[in-house]
Image (tube, rainbow, N blue to C red):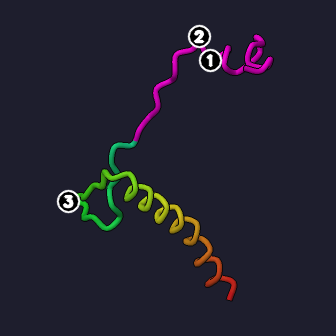
């Protein structure tokens, strides 16, 4: 154990008395191609990560595509 861990300003000592804050977990995401009247949800975390990535990329590229067409 190093001297830093035994000091009062160490992160370890400051965390001992605190209870961890609960995190908001996302249990499922609605797929982008699901119909409005019967939505389809994905609950696998790897598929949810792909859905979030694809949605984020589409938001980033949406403004770029419209800006390219207006400047030409």
Most distant residue in the front direction: 1
Q: Percent position (x, y) of residue 66? A: 59, 77
Position of residue 24 in the picture relative to residue 35 (left or right):
right
* Separation of residues labelled 2 and 1 (CA atoms): 6 Å
Q: Secondary structure at mark 3?
A: loop
Q: Is residue 2 magenta?
A: yes
Most distant residue in the right direction: 3
Q: Secondary structure at mark 1?
A: helix
Residue picked out by circle 1: 15
Quarter of the figure with the C terminus: bottom right
Which residue is located at x 52 percent, y 21 percent? 20
* Separation of residues labelled 3 and 2 (CA atoms): 49 Å
Mark 3 vs mark 2, foreground winner is 2
* Separation of residues labelled 1 and 3 (CA atoms): 47 Å
- Stretch of the chain drawn in magenta: 1-25
Q: Is residue 29 magenta?
A: no
Find out whether the residues at labels 3 and 2 contact each other: C-beta distance under 8 Å: no
Find out whether the residues at labels 2 and 1 contact each other: C-beta distance under 8 Å: yes
> Picture quarter containing residue 15?
top right
Image position of 69 with respect to 57: above or below = below
> Picture quarter containing residue 47?
bottom left
Residue 11 vs residue 18, the one in the foreground: 11
Q: Percent position (x, y) of residue 57? A: 53, 66
Which residue is located at x 47 percent, y 31 percent? 23
Few, some or many residues within 10 Å of mark 2 (<14, 14–19, 20+): few
Image position of 32 with respect to 1: above or below = below
Residue picked out by circle 2: 17
Q: Secondary structure at mark 2?
A: loop
Residue picked out by circle 3: 37
């Amino acid at each position: 154990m190093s001297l830093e861990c035994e000091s009062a300003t160490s992160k370890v000592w400051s965390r001992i008395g605190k209870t961890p804050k609960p995190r908001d977990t996302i249990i499922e995401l609605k797929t982008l191609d699901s119909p409005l009247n019967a939505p389809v949800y994905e609950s696998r975390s790897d598929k949810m990560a792909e859905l979030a990535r694809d949605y984020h990329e589409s938001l980033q590229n949406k403004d770029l595509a419209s800006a390219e067409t207006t400047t030409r």
